[in-house]
Amino acid sequence: MTRPGRLSARLRRLPVVARLVLAVAVTMSLVLAGTAGLVYWRVETALDRQLDGDLATYEQSLDRAVRAGDVLPPGPDGSLHQVLDAEGRVLRSSEALRGQQLLTPAERAAVADGATVRRDVGSLLPITSDTLRLQARRVTAGGQPRIVVAAVRRGHRDEALRELLAQLALASGLTLLAASYAGYRTARAALRPVERYSSGAAALADSTGGTQDLRLEVPTDRDDEITRLGHTLNRMLDRLDASAAREHQFIADASHELRTPLTLMRAEIDVALHRPRNAEELTDTLRSVDTEVGRLVSLANALLDLEQLDSGEGVQPSAIGLGRLLDDACARYRTAAAREERTLTVEHGDATVRVDPRWLEPAIGTLLDNALRHGAGTIRLRAETHGGRLRLTVTDEGPGFPPDFLPRAFDRFSRAETSRTTPGTGLGLALVAAVAASHDGTAHAENTASGATVNLDIAC
């Protein structure tokens, strides 16, 4: 792994707060460096402009004095001058120079050729003595070429810049520390709800109690990203809770409903084993056992179908003609109705719906089967579409639902105990309601003046 790759991997292993603080520190460092550089450049430019102005004024006064052969004028405090002939010999010089040459041979040659030379002597950092800024030009005095060198000291300018650097470094350092601390506190405050959610989720994961509320404490007076994360986690916990509840309900329902047929089968088999029986009695026993096995198979299939629908799996809507859907669902029940000398009518429009016929057809069949077994007279199946919804209605002319049964008609293992006493699993209408819910719809049962009515309103 390359060095940048190792650095990136190392950064990813840091805690989120550390990465946020590091990002704030790096960003603030860049901003402060840019700001300090801009301030330093502006101040340096202003000081250099003033220093260059003083140097230019002094150099012009020296040029005039040399041309006129006058006494060289004094310059700014601490200024220096030097006058050289064409061969570089010093003709006049400030006392402080004591014969020291301000120009190098190359610079003297350049000035002799007509160029103007300007440069600094000494550096800002580290601190050095006798820092100067000099300027040299060629002039003509008495018909002879002369090199005039003017120099002013940079001490005040350099001292001001060093003081500015120190102040900028101090201010930038303090600002960086304050920004990093503020970033740390802000990151901690922002991530504190996340830590609380993490602790709450860990506590829920470690909890063994079945009655604990699977919810995280999320503020209701906020709408920021962290709060939305809390609501998302709560929705996830709700789904997990609902899934666990479905699992417990499935186990409870299965154990409750399987107990009776299994007990009956065990009793029949025990009697057959412990008492000699003839062939006819054994046949009756096997028929009884077969009946209970069939009931167990139907019950197991119904429970598995309900669990699959409740979990949201297996529903795959597809486009299908409404007429074809209803014809397929009613095919087997037309014969049964004719056998009982009853009429089954189907009314529908010419439309194409988007549903899952694999589930909707059995649901319609369950309603028709109930109407055949518990109702009377003509059975009517009516379907109509409107606004992206499909409404299915099954009516019969029987006695209707018992009034006390209607509120729990779609509950699992709920059976009418008065007029509708035919044996069954009690899961038929529960399966119908689950199919409706899986299609973003509802199921509703009611009694009318002519009999019982069950409505399915689903998305299509």
Image (cartoon, grey):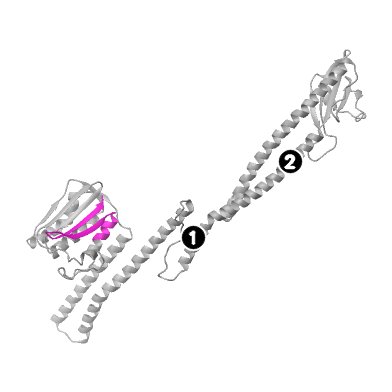
As rendered, which of 184 and 140 lies closer to the eye?
184
SS for callout 2? helix
Q: Is residue 362 visible?
A: no
Q: Is residue 272 above or below residue 167?
A: below
Q: Residue furthest front?
A: 221
Answer with left or right where residue 229 lies relative to residue 91.
Answer: left
Query: Which residue is at a point 60% across and 48% down the rendered structure image?
Result: 24
Q: Is residue 157 above or below residue 322?
A: above
Answer with left or right where residue 295 lies relative to residue 162.
Answer: left
Report, in whole angstroms, how far the alpha carbon at label 1 lies from the one at label 2: 47 Å
As rendered, which of 127 and 272 lies closer to the eye?
127
Question: Does 397 appear in magenta?
Answer: no
- Counting from the top left corner in percent of width and height, residue 255 is at 30, 73
SS for callout 1? helix
Q: Is residue 315 above or below residue 81?
A: below
Q: Is residue 223 above or below residue 74?
A: below
Question: Does 434 appear in magenta?
Answer: yes
Q: In the picture, residue 454 is in which quadrant?
A: bottom left
| Label 1–label 2 contact, CB within 8 A | no
- Counting from the top left corner in percent of width and height, residue 287 is at 17, 75
Answer with left or right where residue 329 lies relative to residue 108.
Answer: left
Residue on which the image places disc 2:
165
Query: Which residue is at a point 24% across and 76% down the rendered structure image?
Result: 260
The residue type indicated by label 2 comes to Leu
Please rate how many residues cluster around mark 1, counting C-alpha atoms within 10 Å: few if below 14, some from 14 to 19, many from 20. Answer: many
- Counting from the top left corner in percent of width and height, residue 243 is at 36, 63
Residue on which the image places disc 1:
197
Q: Which residues are magenta?
A: 432-460
Query: Which residue is at a point 19% across and 49% down the rendered structure image?
Result: 384
